[in-house]
Image (tube, coloured by chain):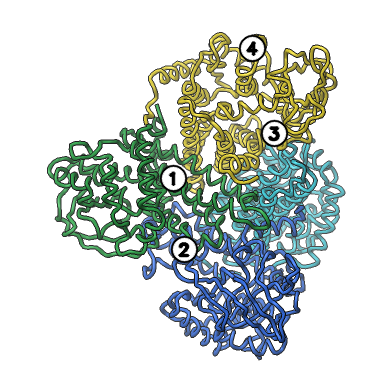
Chain colours: A cyan, B green, C yellow, D blue
Amino acid sequence: MRVLPDPDALDFADSVRDLLSDAAGSTALRGAWDNENGLIPGLWKQLAEVGVLGLTVPEEYGGSGADLTSALPVLVETGRAATPEPVVETLVGTAVLAAAGGELAAHWLPRVVTGDAVLTVAFGPGQLVTAAPWADLFVVRDAAGVRAVPAVDVARIDHNSVDTGRRLAEISYDPTAGTVVDGADAESAFDLGAVAIAAQLTGLADAMLEMAVEYAKTREQFGAPIGSFQAIKHHLATAYVANSFARPVVARGAFSVASGWSTRRRDASHAKYAAGQAARRAARTALQVHAGIGYTFEHDLHMWMKRTWSLTSQWGGQAWHRERVAAAVLDGSVEGQG
Amino acid sequence: MRVLPDPDALDFADSVRDLLSDAAGSTALRGAWDNENGLIPGLWKQLAEVGVLGLTVPEEYGGSGADLTSALPVLVETGRAATPEPVVETLVGTAVLAAAGGELAAHWLPRVVTGDAVLTVAFGPGQLVTAAPWADLFVVRDAAGVRAVPAVDVARIDHNSVDTGRRLAEISYDPTAGTVVDGADAESAFDLGAVAIAAQLTGLADAMLEMAVEYAKTREQFGAPIGSFQAIKHHLATAYVANSFARPVVARGAFSVASGWSTRRRDASHAKYAAGQAARRAARTALQVHAGIGYTFEHDLHMWMKRTWSLTSQWGGQAWHRERVAAAVLDGSVEGQG
Amino acid sequence: MDLTEPAEVAAFRLEAREWLAANVPTTPLPSLDTADGFAAHRDWEARMYDARWAVVTWPEEYGGRAAGLLEWLAFEEEYWAAGAPVRVSQNGIFLLAPTIFEFGTQEQKDRLLPPMARAEEVWAQGWSEPGSGSDLASLRSKAEKVDGGWRVSGQKTWSTRGAFADWMFGLFRSDPESSRHHGLTYLLFPLKQDGVTVRPIRQLDGEPGFAEVFLDDVFVPDAMVLGGVGEGWKVAMSTTTSERGLTLRSPGRFMASANRLVDLYRSTAATDSVAATAVRADVVQAWMDADAYRLYVLDTALRALDGEPIGAESSANKLFWSELDIAIHETALALLGDRATLDLDEPSAQWLDGYQFALAGPIYAGTNEVQRNVIAERVLGLPR
Amino acid sequence: MDLTEPAEVAAFRLEAREWLAANVPTTPLPSLDTADGFAAHRDWEARMYDARWAVVTWPEEYGGRAAGLLEWLAFEEEYWAAGAPVRVSQNGIFLLAPTIFEFGTQEQKDRLLPPMARAEEVWAQGWSEPGSGSDLASLRSKAEKVDGGWRVSGQKTWSTRGAFADWMFGLFRSDPESSRHHGLTYLLFPLKQDGVTVRPIRQLDGEPGFAEVFLDDVFVPDAMVLGGVGEGWKVAMSTTTSERGLTLRSPGRFMASANRLVDLYRSTAATDSVAATAVRADVVQAWMDADAYRLYVLDTALRALDGEPIGAESSANKLFWSELDIAIHETALALLGDRATLDLDEPSAQWLDGYQFALAGPIYAGTNEVQRNVIAERVLGLPR
């Protein structure tokens, strides 16, 4: 019985953290925000090479066959680094294709694992898609179930998002385009994505609090570091506690989804809600601690804040997930807890 | 155009404040909490003599004919003193009888104004009545409208309340007992009570914050008054701001109800909600600042806290009033503001 | 107690409403943090000035209507309810002008007020410095006495409107031996002159809403000292605790936002009642708080009219509106769901813009932490 | 990562569940803050002891089952879900016993643990003094060395269970020249002896839940020093940062409260859907937080079992459960509406009682203000 990930998963995440801090640090990130496609040049191939893209893909398709619980630490790192690339979308899309198997999986998965093909997904209650300009395949939930549509058959309207490290588009396609993914479980794919995003949110929160703590130690006002004032201390302590209590909820969400527990819907929503609340609090706290400097585009903080806004608004917003938990707990029965 | 009460009303409230601090200070209050009927011996007659009981009763019945807006400051004082006597119930009951006029008014009002008869009321969404053991007349809302039932026709079940300075009973009576109060507007009587209680709540909040501020100035820990620590300062400042912003909302509620504005239901509920939230925050803050000593029955604070719990739970609870505002603002139209 | 609006205020309100209905631009102006937008906002204010709506509280001789506080509150309610543009001249007309009226020389009034009112000369703030944010009294930019005036050097930052503004007002250390609140002088000078370097700072939304201003031996004539030499702190503070506390953010602005939030709630509820119900309590809370803010400011204004001194109300005010503004916009973003982060020309982007603007509220004009200290120490009397 | 409950824990849980189902009193015991209630709670714990459920984590030789942390968590979940009484022996078995196991002599273990486990000897805390609350290190009650032991004088306050307890544990200044954390000694002594005066203090609910204890030249033999002379602070603190941080308030307690809140919500919704809907978000928030607390403690326990050191988790824990407990009960009172303040034998009074109990949470065992300081300084490394 463990809540924390296994040591192997943590070691792998450490190596990804090193990769991201070398190849996708704040200067690279700033470049991605400003460039044409919102991506860090070369990073996708590197993520493929070290095995991030195939981490949860079955070995027969060239992946490592890990489950969601083992992928959590890597997802946290991609959150901590505010990575713009569609890591969560890859995780969800490959899971759907692998579960369906057959020709679709055999064709796409080996290419996705190596980074030679890119897929993106649309499973949330809205229909905004990220990585759309760049994707070769769209795996989407629609009225007919789940459908895989090649990019050539997809029309898109690009939207401006405040988080230009996560560009958004609305897509449309002929209702008969592409292939129906037989037996795909759209709801479980959604839960998978919710937990994966929740993991990223805890990483985002960590990173923002770390920035704020470092700033509070060095910035002086009234002849003392501002971190010595009780108001600043208590703001930061409160945000730290919120994120500390979100983390095990996310871990349970992962285990519940991976194990197919009867409470998996509730647990996935609880994970995204708790991590989202913690990340929002971390963002507000970090901004207030940084004050003016944190309000500038020149400072890194804004990229982390805006990613927090994106991830807490999309794939089901905060109130939406809270209500999904409420429907399970208050209207249904409180099912066996893990 | 004024939000603040007129100087005359404030002067009168000052004299009532003096009376209450002489005759109904914390020692007297403690006595009332422990004695058989929960009242301060002799106080009711004194309140009658100085004109509190008849303040809003028309002059033809021996009162002063003031409207609710002029009564607000006195109500605030009865809140500040955590007065156990049924001042709000008297205000509401006499207003209903005076509006109806006729024999009922002529018989009861002069006696109520002098303190020779006591009435109580039941208009809230629940049916718990205060001052029941002591009342000569019950003015109650029921399915038939509003009914005035003499005590002799009322059966009651006394309940234990944590606020023994405000005892509660459930009452019952034969559906044909007493007199139907012709043309009584039960909803407006309810609004009147809601605003009157809101005024008491702002007084309670004031008193609790004052206790907490005084304590914070004198209690020392870590070699300094605890009021010099920023955490304590910010708790108290936040509670102070909440009550400061509730006060004009209560004043507007009084004016809106007294003037029969179309928004009076919404305004009355907003008043009770805002004052209730502020008082609850003041109670939590005062307890946290006092810490152990505030948690004792020996310290005065608990009587003010428990009155806050009573008044925010009864005559429509906090969520109930917020939802009443929501129904007006969100489902209806936002009507002309004053 | 009487909350009925006096007839003359109601008449004033109606006149404003009619003019605004006929004149407010039907499509929103570009952001005033862009060069184009700045110019467009100047034009709008010039039109307001021509109709004598730019500075309603000012005396008629300077283009105002000598309106009282109640008229001002009514005007502001109408202004924001009409969806009119934000005021590019705000620093000048709401922050600096009251100080000029109180401390300025006749010459200063005549020279400075008319172009300020027409938005021909837009003012930037010169308060904060890199080492002096919350702790304003630690500022170090210096003014050295020379013949006929002062030589000013140093660096100001977070200068709102600094990127495009014409003039700056601010505090400078005129006595090199002084420390803290002493020895400061309040100076006024044009930004477009030698020795002044303006470096725009991109704010959260990517636009240059404020600037760093580097001052290298800039000459300021004696005539542009506001109030006495060495009296800068007193001059700067005198208006923060008076009516200026009221006028920094008018209630009409938040009431208009809250009413738009109600509209957004209703349109969401029509298509997705689950989403709407989940934030219903937050929507009504925001609306109630906006209404409470309106009433609180009205109460303060009425007491000011009765001659009561206005003190720490400005700190309580600032805490309340800054937190309210964030709550209104966070609730709106929750209602927008997936579309909350859509930006620029997207139809919902006004809420995102408003949110980003609101996030600065608890920081500028004295952080909310400083305001809570002020209330605790000056109002409640807690020990420092 | 595997959250499946191990088979041996599940079996242990089942055994506990069955015993509790058969043995938990069907009518609630009277309040343990009354003499009758105290006696009734002692009896209940004696029955638990006889069935070896009183101290499941203790070694078998002292009446326990040598249960691990996971079994303990499972037992606590079952205990509170069964609606079993609060533990009158809590001070002893959860706070003092871990310290005795770590620092006690064999003689102390043999003398003190068995009657503690049977609730024959109930322990009161002797930490706070009138001038030493949050600032515990400032305590002044003194222990003077005499032949064979110590003479203790001074005053302790907020001594939980002090009104009816049999023994006291606490810190005393044994070196008169010392200050702050130095020169303190951890002493154990019976309360029923000459020189000890217990003045019960009525707490918020009117019952004597704690007491002031006056000590006038009370003799404590050397054998009842716990840990070394002058080592009192270290002895007292060693367990606060270890497992004791976990066991002060078990998650089972809050999960059981949250599930009862869900039941209350459902019964309210059945008769008054408006009232229920208005607090629906608060109900689910409370349930989620109770669940989060359960998972956080489980995570900490599993890491402790893996040999990881447990540090400031106890401060984060304490903040979280104390605020959660208040939130659960405030939400319940909101659902009760008019009946929220009904007391004593009224059916809803369990919620009011629970609320009053919960209100002490942010105060005792180190105020939440102190806990936030601890997290900021010791975990985040912010300057003092």
Q: Is residue A262 left or right of residue C219?
A: left
Q: Quadrant of residue C94?
A: top right
**Quick one: A85 or C179, which is closer to the camera?**
C179
Q: Position of residue A180 (x, y in %)?
A: 63, 52
Q: Which is nearer the N-term, disc 3 or disc 4?
A: 4
Cα distance in 3D space between marks 3 and 4:
36 Å
**Quick one: B103 or B336, which is closer to the camera?**
B103
- Amino acid type for the residue under numbered disc 2: Glu
Cα distance in 3D space between marks 1 and 3:
41 Å
Cα distance in 3D space between marks 2 and 3:
56 Å
Mark 2 falls within which chain?
Answer: B
Mark 4 falls within which chain?
Answer: C
Q: Is residue D162 above or below residue A26?
A: below
- Amino acid type for the residue under numbered disc 4: Lys
Cα distance in 3D space between marks 2 and 1:
24 Å
Cα distance in 3D space between marks 2 and 4:
63 Å
Callout 3: SS: loop
Residue under pointer 2: B298
Query: Please, which residue is most extreme toward the left here?
Result: B103
Residue under pointer 1: B202
Query: Please, which residue is most extreme toward the right here?
Result: A22
Callout 1: SS: helix
Q: Is residue A321 above or below residue D196?
A: above
- Few, some or many C-alpha atoms within 10 Å of disc 4 (few <14, some 14-19, many ≥20)? some
Number of the front mark, 1 or 3: 1
